Amino acid sequence: MGATGSGKTTFVNMASGDNLAVGGDLESCTSVVQMCKPFGLDGRRVILVDTPGFDDTRTKDIDILAMIAAFLTTTYEEGKLLAGVIYMHRISDVRMGGLSVRNFRLLRRLCGEKTLKNLAIVTNMWGEVSHSVGEAREAELASKENFFKPALDKGAMLLRHTNTFDSAANILRHFIRSEPLPLQIQDEIVHKHMDLPETAAGVELHSELQALMRKHEQEIRMLKAEMSEALRLKENELRDEIRTEIHQLQGESNRFRRDAQEMASKYESEKSRLESQIRESAEAAKREQAKLINEYEGKLSEFEKKIQEGAPAWEVVELRMKIIALEKEMADMHPNNGGCTIC
């Protein structure tokens, strides 16, 4: 998780070897929650989950929260827990601005206080600043109450990513043996039966919308007073400008109001879509497994036949290698040593 352009998708691709689409510095390519292909690390099967930032260039914050919440609750109901959460932050940013503070605040509302020990705050883009500047910014982030200090005091980790595979793998190693815990939003929706707007993250986002609506309403009142004065003075051009501004502000206020009202319905819609997708994926996996088993059994029969017939050694070895490859493919589908999912 993290702001748009913070390197989330690049990190996922580097660690997993996958090829998810990567956006530019300010333009997001991640407009949905997406999982990389499973990969192995230290004998464990790992899946990384990439999410859009709450400052996404193409998707509203309400929709992003609905997508993330739907993914988290749907997978939780399927019995899957996150091993941890990675929050990406650019050390190249001169300061942690309002959007970054807000993004991290929403993340904490999603996670809750009890799961902060499974949160890694990962600074990256160290190659874009001098070492001394980077260290000074890192120290400020770790020591300021309005930045990362409260989360670090409650067990979160502050780690560096230096844009190498080894760096990414070392970060993931902090999670692959950790105890997976349900996030606050999973507990709120699944166990406490809250609607999304009632959750801590939903309340946070809803309060922002309410504040924006109050601000717009105040601006509209001021503009109406200016319009009355313009009418009194018969300043037609000024009156038309004010009327246009009022119309724009009223449109934005109505949009904010609709967004707040639609939060729950968007969550339900996204959750239904994900549940359908999970069912389809499970059915596809069963078909693939059945196909592999049939192929494996066929190769075993062929192998035994060649042994009995005294086939040339190279044919036996070649067939044996195919059988080993199939065994590995089947083991990867159902690992005995467990796995972990990191968001």
Image: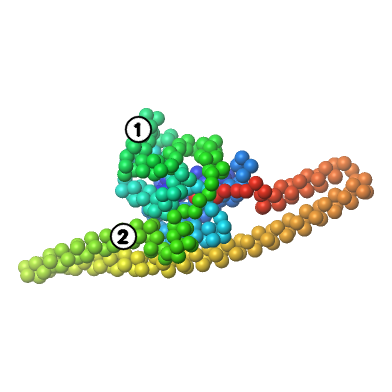
| Residue at figure coordinates x 90%, y 47% from the top left | 307
Query: How many callouts does the rendering have?
Result: 2
The amino acid marked with disc number 2 is Ser
Q: Position of residue 237 (x, y in %)?
A: 14, 66
Residue in front for this viewpoint, 146 or 235: 146
From the viewer's perspective, is 243 left or right of 338?
left
From the viewer's perspective, is 55 left or right of 164?
left
Task: Specify whether residue 158 is in view.
Answer: yes
Q: Nearer the viewer's eye, disc 1 or disc 2?
A: 2
Q: Secondary structure at mark 1?
A: helix
Dots 1, 2 in contact, CB < 8 A: no
Report how far apart the C-alphas of labels 1 and 2 lie in the structure: 34 Å
Q: Tell me, what colour scheme is on the image?
A: rainbow
From the viewer's perspective, is 144 left or right of 13?
left
Q: Position of residue 105 (x, y in %)?
A: 36, 50
The first of marks 1 and 2 along the sequence is 1
- The circle drawn on residue 253 is none
Q: Secondary structure at mark 2?
A: helix
The residue indicated by pointer 1 is: 136
Q: Position of residue 302 (x, y in %)?
A: 85, 52
Residue in front for this viewpoint, 336 or 208: 336
The residue indicated by pointer 2 is: 207
The amino acid marked with disc number 1 is Ala
Give the vertical position of 340 relative to 74 (above or below): above
